[in-house]
Amino acid sequence: MLKSILRKQALQKRKNLTEEEIASLNKRLLAQFKKLDLSTIKTLHIFLPIIHQKEPDTFLLIEWLQKNHPEIQIIVPKSEFDSSLMSHHHYIDKEDLINNHYHIPEPQQAKPFNGIPDMVIVPLLAFDKNGYRVGYGKGFYDRFLQNISTQKIGLSFFDAVTEINDVHLNDIRLDKCITPNKIVEFNC
């Protein structure tokens, strides 16, 4: 299926979710996230949710990490829309965040992070059984993940589609994707 069609379908599926369904899905995502082997992770990059788009609530994951793995540095992105690139910052807390004009929470005072994170939790709208993902179409994460070696893990309320038909050379494959029911691993 084409990305444009998958994007519309996924946005509609998320739009149709009730608040109760979202809360349940988020709890189940957290339960799956807790199963990851974090023993070698020193830095973890995680996206911050666009609440009105009904994205997975990554604040639940961040809070669990802070409580159970305080040794892991949490890194969050800030989008540069003119260049379609992201800068990366050490997460302080929710008080340091302000929504940009796309309603994406972004750090304001946090120190920049210039290294390569050990793990990246990647946003997506849909993913296929080969590990390719559909995002909003701006390519921020494909550019960020290009030429770096790190664990790339998607986070999705929904299961994989069979195949994304219009994969590009620049599309970066995931290593795993966390769903409410399981962690899907891809042989990259």
Image (cartoon, rainbow, N blue to C red):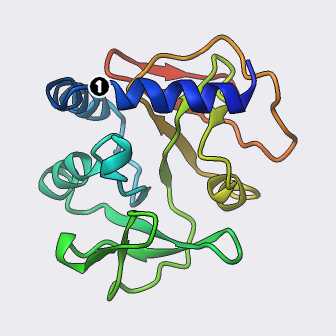
* In this view, 22 is above or below 44: above
For the N terminus, the image quarter is top right
21 or 32, nearer to the observer: 21
Q: Position of residue 124 (x, y in %)?
A: 52, 39
**Mark 1 surroundings within 10 Å by alpha-carbon count, few (fewer than 14), some (14 through 19), many (20 or more):** few
Q: Is residue 47 left or right of residue 61?
A: right
Give me the residue at 67% from left, 48% from top.
Answer: 137
Picture residue at 72% right of the left edge, 59% below the top? 143
Count the numbered circles shown.
1
Taking depth in this image into account, of 182 and 11 the one nearest to the observer is 11
> Which residue position is annotated with label 1?
17
Classify 56 as above or below 27.
Answer: below
Q: Position of residue 83 (x, y in %)?
A: 71, 75
**Which residue is more in the foreground, 72 or 63?**
63
> Vertically, is 85 above or below 50?
below
Where's residue 22, x and y in %?
Answer: 23, 30
Residue 176 left/right relative to 128? left
Outermost residue, right side? 169
Position of residue 41 measured from the top left corner of the image (x, y, whole percent) = 40, 53
| Label 1: element kind | loop
- Residue type beneath disc 1: Leu
Is residue 90 toward the left or the right of residue 119 in the image?
A: left
Residue at 70% from the left image edge and 32% from the top image edge = 4
Camera-nearest residue between 180 and 43: 180
Looking at the image, which residue is at 71% across and 16% down? 163
Quadrant location of residue 17?
A: top left
